[in-house]
Structure formats: C-alpha cells, structure tokens
C-alpha cells in the first residue's frame, strides 16, 4: 500500500463522497437499475453506513443514514424521483436474484 492508513481512509472517504454526489447528479438512475447491474443501491449504501457505525460502537439510525445518502428524507426523494418499476426491470431483477441463488447453491 503506497499510503498510510489515515491517508487511505481520507482518499476512500473522498471517493465515497464523490459517489454520493454522482448518484445525486444522476437521479434518473433508479435503485432497481443499480440492483440489476451492480447488486447494490442507495439503500444498500445507507445500510453499510449503519453497519460501519455499529462496528465502531456508534448508533446511526437507518433513516438518518438514508437521508445522508439521498441528500433529503427518503420519502421525499421517493416521491420526487423514484419511478414505478417496469415489468422489464422486475423481470431482470428476478433473473439476477435467481442467478445469485443458483450461484450460491453451486
């Protein structure tokens, strides 16, 4: 590793902030599309933040973590930007989940 742990942590934090800004600038990208393509979404990021806090003995409420990720309360973001999933999206998500399940069983 070319950097000390503190510098690496700072760089990773900066990259995470950039990811959040990128997602915020691309609100048209739906969570289900992220789940289909990358197996994570904005809600996953919030869950990972909560888990990271818990690992350090800190309490970060899931809804507060989602507000951090979305830049506003999730209910507001959902009303403003989340479109209903299409049949094609639902089918693609189901196929991805089936493939994951099959892979785990292999």
Image (cartoon, rainbow, N blue to C red):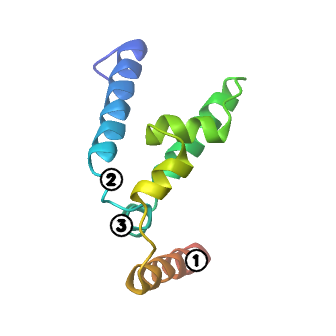
Q: CA distance from mark 2 to mark 3?
A: 16 Å
Disc 1 versus disc 3: distance between alpha carbons?
16 Å
- Who is closer to the viewer here, 49 or 25? 25
Q: Secondary structure at mark 1?
A: helix
Total number of numbered discs in the rendering: 3
Disc 2 target residue:
27
Note whether residue 69 is visible: yes
Helix, strand or loop at disc 2?
loop
Left or right, 96 with reference to 65 = left
**The image quarter in which residue 104 lies:** bottom right
Q: Quadrant of the N terminus?
A: top left
Image disc number at residue 37: 3
Q: Who's the residue at 48% across and 39% down the image?
A: 72
* Among numbered discs 1 and 2, the one appearing first in the sequence: 2
Residue 22, image x, y percentages: 28, 42
Q: Are marks 1 and 2 in contact (CB under 8 Å)?
A: no
Rendered location of residue 11, percent (x, y) = 32, 23
Crowdedness near tag 1: few (<14), some (14–19) or many (≥20) residues, C-alpha within 10 Å: few
Residue 80 higher or lower than 95, as above or below? above
Asked whether the viewer can see residue 44, the reply is no
Q: Which mark is residue 61?
A: none
Q: Read off the residue under disc 1.
A: 101
- Percent position of residue 85, x then y: 45, 75
Q: Secondary structure at mark 3?
A: helix
Mark in front: 1 vs 2: 2
Pick the quarter of the image with the C terminus.
Answer: bottom right
How dense is the environment of label 2, judged by Cα within 10 Å: few (below 14), some, or many (20 and up)?
A: some
């Amino acid at each position: 590793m070319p950097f000390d742990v503190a510098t690496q942590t700072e760089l990773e934090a900066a990259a995470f902030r950039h990811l959040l800004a990128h997602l915020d600038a691309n609100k048209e990208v739906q969570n289900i599309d992220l789940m289909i393509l990358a197996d994570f979404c904005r809600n996953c990021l919030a869950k990972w933040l909560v888990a990271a806090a818990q690992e350090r003995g800190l309490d970060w409420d899931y809804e507060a973590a989602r507000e951090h990720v979305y830049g506003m309360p999730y209910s507001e973001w959902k009303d403003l930007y989340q479109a209903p999933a299409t049949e094609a999206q639902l089918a693609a998500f189901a196929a991805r989940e089936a493939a994951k399940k099959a892979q785990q069983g292999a």
